[in-house]
Image (cartoon, grey):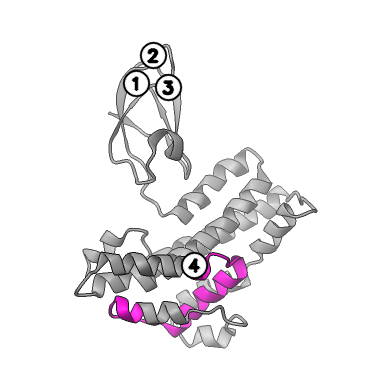
Amino acid sequence: MTKVKQASYENIVVECPWCGRENIFNRASDLRTFEPIAGLDVSCQNVECGKPFRIVGDSVNNRHEMLILDCYELLERKHYMNCILTLTQAYEVFFSLFLRVELLYKPFARDERKDINHFNRLAEMLSKKVERCTFIPMRKLFLQQIIAAPRPANLAEAETLIAKLKVPSCEPADTELERLGDEELVALLKGVKKTTIHKCRNAVVHKRAYRPTREETEAALEEARSLLLPLTNRLGLYDDINWYLKRS
């Protein structure tokens, strides 16, 4: 067995135990799975070798966490534009995960019937609700759900909430967040509310093709890591419905 040398969001890097050549396996094209690799038989990509071996030790982080961690290599290689794009995407993926957990995974785990067809219909319904939402609308939905704190007991209640889901006209005031009464959580939520990473992203991708400095990029990376990773833990977010089923 050969342990993964580097696990990124898109690729797995491992050295062949036979020839020592570095192999880069793309999750979509080569491995054809996005599930964490507990163990998988592959063949060396070096045509002069081609011997089989087994890879183990993949990352089990959530998608937004992997995107954040990928940014350290982008930073090292001075790909600051790509780093800003990836960090902004990490926020959006985080917001999306929160909505899935609260409106799909948890209600399904609580539901006595556990109708998978109903779950799939609601997943499609939620996807359509947010498919055109960019950074700001997704952040508004995230903060709105945090404050409203709905706890649907089953998929029927979740369906009602998803049907009524609408992007608020404005983000909540700090005083609304403070009513949650959890100082650490409130501080993290205020940080998410105040981040301007999306503005930097827009400057990068639009006509200006803005090139951020290392200092700007390092600050954005530290901000994202210091906000999203603790929030993931505090909110108990896992992109795995089985995690919630085992605890229901």
**In the image as oriented, which residue stretches furthest toward the left?**
112
Residue 241, above or below 36: below
Using the rendered image of the protein, determine whether residue 12 is visible from the camera's viewpoint. Answer: no
Residue 152 falls inside the magenta stretch: yes
Q: Which mark is on residue 49? A: 2
Label 1 or label 2, whichever comes before in sequence order: 1
Give 95 or 121, whichever is nearer the viewer.
Answer: 121
Measured from the top left, where is residue 202 in percent x and y?
Answer: 71, 59
Distance from label 1 to label 2 (Cα)?
Answer: 11 Å
Distance from label 3 to label 2 (Cα)?
Answer: 8 Å
Circle 1 or circle 4, nearest the eye: 4
Using the rendered image of the protein, determine whether residue 163 is visible from the camera's viewpoint. Answer: yes
**In the image as oriented, which residue stretches furthest toward the right?**
208
Q: Which residue is mark 3?
A: 45
Mark 1 secondary-structure assignment? loop
- The local crowd at label 1, few if under 14, some if 14 to 19, many if 20 or more residues have their Cα within 10 Å, is some
Q: Which mark is on residue 17? A: 1
